[in-house]
């Protein structure tokens, strides 16, 4: 894939110019576009119907260690991001912590993207490293609050991932 950084005020223009040339995937939407994207009067209405923002915040050290390892495509290189879909989440809404690990093609493991849900209100706790590493019990509590309907084995796996992410943040 190729990704581009587009300022929010330019999104309608970019969408309208590209939709006639390229397939368009909008998160959470399916089916064909029925409006005429060339109709300039429809720009705002079309964008509001099509918009499904995906927001990502990438974390790294001051030295940008994670970024440098990913650019070099080093075996085991990781990136850590926080992602949400739609409008900025409120305190009790879910956000997703994602850890992507690159594996070389000559190793039998494929690159992996793992994610764990957390309540938005718990994000400041994650980045405040003053209390050090977290116990697996505390991670389990946070994961269970964010995903109360998940199965116990999924909660256990997610808590282990949260613990790993916390160690990266620390």
Image (cartoon, rainbow, N blue to C red):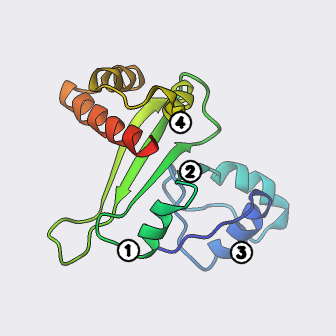
Q: Please provide percent x and percent y for residue 80.
A: 45, 51
Q: CA distance from mark 3 to mark 2?
A: 24 Å
Tell me the residue that label 2 is attached to. 56
Mark toward the viewer: 3 or 1: 1
Q: Please provide percent x and percent y for residue 89.
A: 60, 32
Q: CA distance from mark 1 to mark 2?
A: 21 Å
**Image height check: is 107 above or below 42?**
below
Residue at 53 percent of width and 54 percent of height? 61
Q: Earlier in the sequence, mark 3 or mark 2?
A: 3
Determine contact: label 3, label 2, CB under 8 Å: no
Q: Earlier in the sequence, mark 3 or mark 4?
A: 3
Tell me the residue that label 4 is attached to. 127
Q: CA distance from mark 4 to mark 2?
A: 16 Å
Q: Quadrant of residue 33?
A: bottom right
Mark toward the viewer: 4 or 2: 4
Residue at 39 percent of width and 23 percent of height? 142
Q: Quadrant of residue 92?
A: top right
Determine contact: label 3, label 1, CB under 8 Å: no
Tell me the residue that label 1 is attached to. 73
Q: CA distance from mark 1 to mark 4?
A: 26 Å
Q: Nearer the viewer, residue 1 or 158?
A: 158
Residue at 53 percent of width and 72 percent of height? 23
Q: Nearer the viewer, residue 2 or 57?
A: 57
**Image height check: is 72 above or below 42?**
below
Q: Earlier in the sequence, mark 1 or mark 2?
A: 2
Label 4 crowd bin: few (<14), some (14–19), many (20+), radius 10 Å = few
**Image height check: is 83 above or below 102?**
above
Farthest residue to the left: give it.
108
The numbered dot on residue 17 is: 3
Q: Secondary structure at mark 1?
A: loop
């Amino acid at each position: 894939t190729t990704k581009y950084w587009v300022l929010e005020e330019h999104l309608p223009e970019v969408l309208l110019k590209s939709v006639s040339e390229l397939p368009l995937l909008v998160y959470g939407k399916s089916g064909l576009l029925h409006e005429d994207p060339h109709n300039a009067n429809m720009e705002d209405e079309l964008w509001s119907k099509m918009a499904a923002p995906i927001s990502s915040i990438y974390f790294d050290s001051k030295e940008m260690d994670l970024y440098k390892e990913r650019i070099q495509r080093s075996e085991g290189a990781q990136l850590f991001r926080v992602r949400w879909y739609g409008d900025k989440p409120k305190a009790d809404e879910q956000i997703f912590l994602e850890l992507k690990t690159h594996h070389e093609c000559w190793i039998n493991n494929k690159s992996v993207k793992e994610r764990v849900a957390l309540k938005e209100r718990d994000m400041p706790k994650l980045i405040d490293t003053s209390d050090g590493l977290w116990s697996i019990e505390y991670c389990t509590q946070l994961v269970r609050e964010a995903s109360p309907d998940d199965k116990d084995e999924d909660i256990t796996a997610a808590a282990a991932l949260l613990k790993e992410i916390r160690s990266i943040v620390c």
